[in-house]
Amino acid sequence: AFGWQERKIYWNVTVPRRPSRDVLMAKTVLESKFTEWAGLDRISTMVHGMKCLWREITKDDFGIDGEIEIVLPKKDGKGYETLGNVLKVQAKSGKKYVVRDSTDTFASPVEKTDLETWNNSRYPVLYIVYHPNDDKLYAKEVRSYVKETTSVFQPPCRLVFTKTTDEFNASYFSQIKRHGEVSPDRLTFDEKEELYTNLFPVRKLPPLFHAS
């Protein structure tokens, strides 16, 4: 008779350990993002305080972060109405966008290509800076600033702000209204275009027409 001898087989298996919380690779949120969001939130609050509309662009923004649509009281006193006047907004937040800061003025560095894009835009563009030390917003309409400032495209390109007149607060609404009046209409009846139809002409009607 044959006998069977029991054998024990041991396998060396390495079971991966779950990494501790200390070594997990979490996504990093930069401090600058909180400053950026604080600036956009402040713009939204201020625009709504002016009884205007604020639309933030959250996707594929290239040099434009949002837009302001001007809203005016209706003549009959029953609410407000929009007239289609729009200003585009480029918003900047943080100390890197505030240089040569003093009690009365400061400058904000910009790229020449961005400045050219905003100046050539079909719509007026407001450049708004959130000044963290002052905890205030300041704004410049780019096209009028370029028109009034000599050598504006000479490096280093900067927009200079006067704190008493450029603060973006409730009293800035008069400037928004003035700049918005030159924005192009979203709907125009002045454009003329010849249209072609693909419908066949009806030469003769049938003697009997039945519809069910």
Image: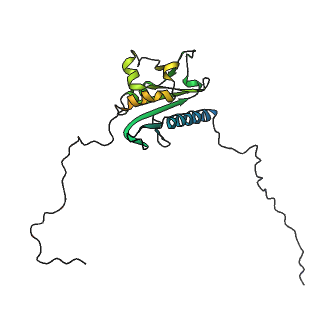
Q: Is residue 117 visible?
A: no
Please tell me whether residue 187 is drawn above or below residue 200 in the rendered image.
above
Q: Nearer the viewer, residue 60 or 187?
A: 187
Q: Is residue 176 visible?
A: yes
Can you say which quadrant of the picture contains the N terminus? bottom right
Q: Nearer the viewer, residue 209 or 15?
A: 209
Q: Residue furthest front?
A: 76
Give the total of numbered labels: 0
Residue 193 occupies quadrant: top left
- Residue 89 position within the rendered picture, expressed as x and y whole percent measured from the top left: 46, 33
Q: Is residue 194 left or right of residue 36?
A: left
Q: Residue furthest bottom?
A: 1
Q: Residue at x 16, y 76 (%)?
A: 209
Q: Residue at x 64, y 38 (%)?
A: 29
- Residue 35 position within the rendered picture, expressed as x and y whole percent measured from the top left: 60, 32
- Residue 192 position within the rendered picture, expressed as x and y whole percent measured from the top left: 20, 43
Please tell me whether residue 127 is drawn above or below residue 85 in the rendered image.
above
- Residue 170 position within the rendered picture, expressed as x and y whole percent measured from the top left: 50, 30
Can you say which quadrant of the picture contains the C terminus? bottom left
Q: Nearer the viewer, residue 43 or 153?
A: 43
Q: Is residue 168 left or right of residue 78?
A: right
Q: Nearer the viewer, residue 79 or 83?
A: 79
Q: Residue furthest left?
A: 204
The coloring applied to the image is rainbow
Residue 2 occupies quadrant: bottom right
